[in-house]
Image: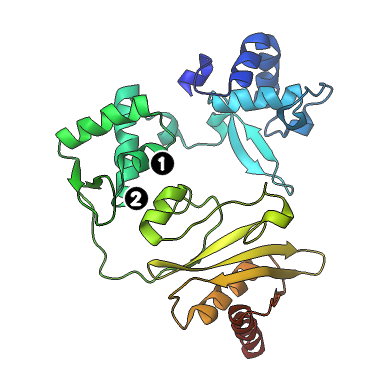
């Protein structure tokens, strides 16, 4: 955030806007301080700029202030639009009063957090977790190895060494069962997903419909310590139905995959305020089994 205030570490266009529109940005900050929390649409009368998804000058000012840490997200509106407010009205005093570490130490702490979160990871995995640049991350990783915070390990099948945090714990068993959104940290770095799970995953939102392999918005399904299936989901709010447009089980998926996935789908539908789950069949065995499991669960309830 300190770097963003100086015009570094953010999109070039946004950095240029911050330099060119200082007076306007100050006015927007004053409005948020005086009237917040505010959405972009609450700040009226400013023209849209070409590109940037049609962002208005008000939106650009709010984004610059957000990146710079001068405002933060207070909440979200019904259309997921951010409501911005000043940090002093959002964060507890204990957080605001915590001293900000020097950049060198902050990078070390971020990489240590990444290592504890990820278990075994490559240097690239650790760098990517908080989107640090190689120039920033790799010297700090070397320091953490030298200090004994990170331990080099060999992982069968990996072309490079892994790194393990010295406080890492090996669980006796993993009983996870979860649908993972495309931006979930577990699957965010696609090459890591392939190394860990042998699971090739790509976000196909921007792929033309006729060229999509699995669907528009596909959720991998985690069962135990494996990714065992994937489902293309759509919330049909008019009909109050969670629609499974496409689904596929992975090679070697356990027999209970359909039943456990049906439970996760019903849970998601409930969370979204939808009343039922509908599975589209495509002539394959797994969609039929999943549809039967979903319908059996609905009947039992």
Q: Secondary structure at mark 2?
A: helix
Residue 26: % across, % down: 66, 14
- CA neighbours of label 2 inside 10 A, class few (<14), some (14 to 19), many (20+): some
Viewed as shown, does residue 268 lie left or right of 47? left
Residue 136: % across, % down: 35, 25
The label shown at residue 181 is none
Foreground residue among 56 and 200: 200
Q: Which residue is mark 1?
A: 129
From the viewer's perspective, is residue 73 above or below residue 277?
above
From the viewer's perspective, is residue 250 above or below residue 116?
below
Q: Secondary structure at mark 1?
A: helix
Residue 124: % across, % down: 35, 39
User: Which residue is painted at 41% across and 35% down in the image?
Assistant: 94
User: Which residue is painted at 50% across and 18% down in the image?
Assistant: 8
Tell me whether the residue at label 1 lies in contact with that at label 2, contact meaning CB atoms closer than 8 angstroms: yes
Foreground residue among 133 and 48: 133
Color theme of the render: rainbow
Viewed as shown, does residue 44 lie left or right of 24? right
The label shown at residue 118 is 2
The quarter of the image holding the C terminus is bottom right
Among the 4 quarters of the image, the one containing residue 146: top left
Viewed as shown, does residue 50 lie left or right of 64? right
User: Which residue is painted at 46% across and 83% down in the image?
Assistant: 255
Residue 169: % across, % down: 23, 57
User: Considering only order in the chain, which callout, 2 or 1, is on the residue closer to the N terminus?
Assistant: 2
- CA neighbours of label 1 inside 10 A, class few (<14), some (14 to 19), many (20+): some
Residue 34: tell me if it is visible.
no
Viewed as shown, does residue 182 lie left or right of 241? left
Alpha carbon of mark 1 to alpha carbon of mark 2: how far? 9 Å
From the viewer's perspective, is residue 204 above or below residue 294?
above
């Amino acid at each position: 955030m300190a770097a963003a205030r100086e015009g570094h570490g953010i999109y070039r266009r946004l950095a240029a806007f911050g330099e060119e529109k200082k007076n306007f940005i100050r006015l927007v900050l004053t409005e948020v301080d005086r009237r917040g929390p505010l959405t972009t649409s609450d700040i009226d009368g400013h023209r849209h700029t070409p590109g940037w998804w049609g962002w208005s000058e008000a939106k650009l000012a709010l984004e610059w202030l957000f990146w710079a840490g001068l405002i933060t997200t207070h909440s979200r509106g019904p259309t997921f639009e951010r409501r911005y407010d000043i940090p002093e009205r959002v964060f507890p005093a204990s957080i605001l009063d915590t001293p900000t570490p020097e950049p060198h130490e902050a990078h070390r702490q971020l990489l240590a957090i990444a290592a504890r979160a990820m278990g075994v990871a490559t240097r690239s995995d650790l760098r990517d977790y908080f989107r640090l640049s190689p120039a920033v991350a790799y010297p700090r990783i070397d320091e953490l190895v030298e200090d004994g915070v990170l331990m080099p390990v060999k992982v069968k099948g990996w072309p490079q060494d892994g790194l393990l945090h010295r406080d890492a714990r090996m669980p006796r068993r993993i009983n996870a069962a979860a649908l993972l959104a495309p931006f979930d940290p577990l699957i965010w770095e696609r090459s890591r997903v392939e190394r860990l799970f042998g699971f090739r995953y790509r976000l196909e939102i921007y792929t033309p419909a006729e060229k999509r392999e699995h669907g528009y918005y596909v959720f991998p399904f985690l069962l135990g310590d494996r990714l065992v299936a994937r489902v293309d989901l759509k919330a049909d709010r008019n009909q109050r139905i969670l629609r499974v447009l496409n689904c596929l089980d992975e090679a070697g998926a356990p027999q209970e995959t359909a039943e456990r996935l049906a439970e996760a789908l019903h849970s998601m539908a409930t969370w979204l305020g939808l009343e039922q789950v509908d599975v589209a069949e495509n002539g394959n065995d797994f969609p039929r089994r999943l549809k039967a499991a979903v319908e059996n669960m609905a009947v039992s309830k």
